[in-house]
Amino acid sequence: VTATFGIPTPSEEKWVAAALLDNRRVEVNSRAKKAIQQAGILGSDVAFGTFLKKKVQEVDPNRPESIVNGIRALTGVKSRSEFNGNPTALKIWERLYDEYKTEAV
């Protein structure tokens, strides 16, 4: 930076320019954002793990990694972020979450 613009000298002005390199906006799917958060929280919840075990026998409710793998198995995603671009996985998660909330009440 100092080679290009020099060392600042308060008594002298040095004009510089700035350019906007990328002004694309990322569309945020609020349903997907909510699902990503829910899955993140419930991925370490023993009660959710117990519920999930009814659907995926291999789930160990006491192991967050096992719960996360169960969520992945049911929704078909490798990462929660995929809910943003995968409407089928998002619907599966929303149904699963609603079913869990209905049973938990």
Image (cartoon, rainbow, N blue to C red):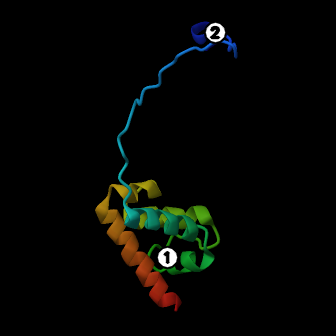
Residue 26, position as x, y percentages in the image = 37, 48
Alpha-carbon neighbours of circle 1 within 10 Å: few (<14), some, or many (≥20)? many
Q: Nearer the viewer, residue 48 or 15?
A: 15
Q: Residue furthest left?
A: 88
Tell me the kind of residue under disc 2.
Gly
Q: Nearer the viewer, residue 102 or 51?
A: 102
- Quadrant housing residue 4: top right
- Quadrant housing residue 82: bottom left
Residue 52, position as x, y percentages in the image = 49, 76
Residue with the mark numbered 1: 52
Q: CA distance from mark 2 to mark 1?
A: 62 Å
Q: Between disc 2 and disc 1, whose residue precedes?
A: 2
Residue with the mark numbered 2: 6
Residue located at (59% from left, 71% from top): 60
In the rendered image, the vertical position of residue 12 relative to residue 71, given as above or below: above
Q: Is residue 40 left or right of residue 55?
A: right
Residue 67, position as x, y percentages in the image = 54, 67
Residue 70, position as x, y percentages in the image = 48, 66
Residue located at (47% from left, 82% from top): 100
